[in-house]
Amino acid sequence: MQTIGTKTPSAGSGQGERDPGSGPRAPYPDLVPLLAGAAVAAGAAGAVLALLDLSTPARAPLTLFFLLAAPGFAIAHWLRGLEARGRAVAAAAGAIAVNLLVAPALLALHVWSVRGGVAAVAGLSAAIFLSDLARRRRHRAPRRRT
């Protein structure tokens, strides 16, 4: 019977330098903040274009991006304990649910407008995000002063 052994890398080989519990690394970690900034800029541009009623070909796709991204990012902030893929799926479903709740509510109240819909989604997204910040601040361990 043959046993299979594991070969440990030598100290100077450059292999095995990573922390074993750190998990896989992102291929381009510097791109994450750049992409997040671009997403915020695109969403803000969509909201501004819709709220100011500016006519441009970019208005529809940027406004749609805002309507999906704003509640999605707010809900994803609530779900920080989940894995990345599960959090993305839950945040996307929550963003669609927020939009599907805002539209009939505005129609039922006879106050539907594009500006009103964008403002309502922005307000709900801000409320979701700020409620998570308040929840985290409230549950933080009390500081002791000496």
Image: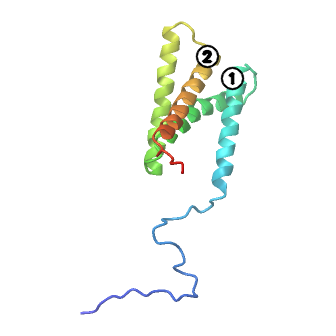
Kind of residue sitting beneath label 1? Ala
Colouring: rainbow
* Image height of 81 relative to 72, above or below: below
Question: Which badge, 1 or 2, is on the more N-terminal residue?
Answer: 1
Residue nearest the observer in this picture, 119 or 136:
136
Tag 2 residue: 116
Residue nearest the observer in this picture, 37 or 92:
37
* Residue beneath the point at 54% across and 6% down: 110
* Image height of 53 relative to 24, above or below: above
Q: CA distance from mark 1 to mark 2?
A: 10 Å
Residue 92 point in image, percent of width and height = 49, 37
Q: Residue furthest bottom?
A: 1
* Residue beneath the point at 70% across and 38% down: 41
* Image height of 114 relative to 87, above or below: above
Residue nearest the observer in this picture, 128 or 5:
128
Kind of residue sitting beneath label 2? Gly
Residue 73 point in image, percent of width and height = 55, 38
Residue 75 point in image, percent of width and height = 50, 36
Tag 1 residue: 50
Mark carried by residue 107? none
109 sits to left or right of 44: left
Of tags 1 and 2, the one toward the viewer is 2
Q: Residue furthest left?
A: 1
